[in-house]
Each structure stands twice: as C-alpha cells, then as structure tokens.
Image (cartoon, rainbow, N blue to C red):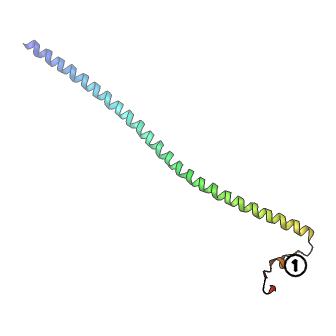
Amino acid sequence: MEQLWWTAIVVALVVTFVVGLLLSLILREAARIEAGAAQIWTAGKLIANNTILITLLIRTNQLVAEILKAAGGIAGGAQRIEAHAAICPGCPQCVAAQAAPKSPLWGTR
C-alpha cells in the first residue's frame, strides 16, 4: 500500500511538472503573439495617418489644377496683349476706347 502512495505522489509530481512546462510554453507563445499584435497595431495606426494625408493631397491636386487653368488664361491674355502691342503703336488709346462701356441710350462715355 505504501508503494501505491509513492507511485501516486510521483505521478502527481510528473503531471504537475508537465502541466507547469506546458503552461510556461503557452505563456511564452502568448507573449510572442501579443508582441506581434502590438507591431500590427502600430503599423495600422501609421497607415491610417498616411491615408489622412492622401485626402489632403487630393484636395491640393484639385487646387493646383484650378491654378493651372487660371494661369493658362493669364498666359493667353498676355500673348494677346503682346501681339496687339506689336501692331498697335497707340495702344493706350485702344485700351481706353475698349474699356469705356457703351450705353444704348447715351452713346459712349
């Protein structure tokens, strides 16, 4: 009977050791998984910050396109002025005559 008790104690100690070993392996693996999840979370936050900037870049591109369109109009106007100045020696008079609004009742001002 005494040998049965010793056998039971040894089996209990072996089982306890194996359970402790398995629990420490599980804890180590859980810590590794948690570290990986923390890296994924950090990368996700950085990506989210970058996508906010993409929205701002889209708006910037829209504004640049509007500026480019306006600049094209200004360049076209400057070319027309340059061409007119090349053929018209009295250009200030032409400009003054064109700038005066015409009224159907009163004629020109």
Residue furthest bottom in the image = 106
Please say if 25 is above or below 52: above
Residue at the spot 28% in from the left edge and 28% down from the top edge: 23
Q: Quadrant of the C terminus?
A: bottom right
Q: Residues within 10 Å of mark 1 (few under 14, many from 20)?
A: few
Q: Quadrant of residue 91?
A: bottom right
* Callout 1 secondary element: helix
Please say if 86 is above or below 58: below
Residue at the spot 80% in from the left edge and 65% down from the top edge: 77
Q: Quadrant of residue 92?
A: bottom right
Rendered location of residue 11, percent (x, y): 18, 17
Figure disc tally: 1
Task: Answer with left or right where residue 33 lies relative to residue 61.
Answer: left
User: Closer to the camera, 19 or 41?
Assistant: 41
Q: Quadrant of the N terminus?
A: top left
User: Closer to the camera, 3 or 102?
Assistant: 102
Residue at the spot 62% in from the left edge and 56% down from the top edge: 60
Name the residue tied to disc 1.
Answer: 93
Residue at the spot 28% in from the left edge and 25% down from the top edge: 21
Please say if 81 is above or below 37: below
User: Closer to the camera, 89 or 41?
Assistant: 89
Please say if 39 is above or below 52: above
Would you say residue 109 is visible in this rendering?
Answer: no
Which amino acid lies under the numbered mark 1 shown in the image of this protein? Gln
Would you say residue 90 is visible in this rendering?
Answer: yes
Task: Answer with left or right where residue 51 lies relative to residue 35.
Answer: right
Q: Quadrant of residue 78?
A: bottom right
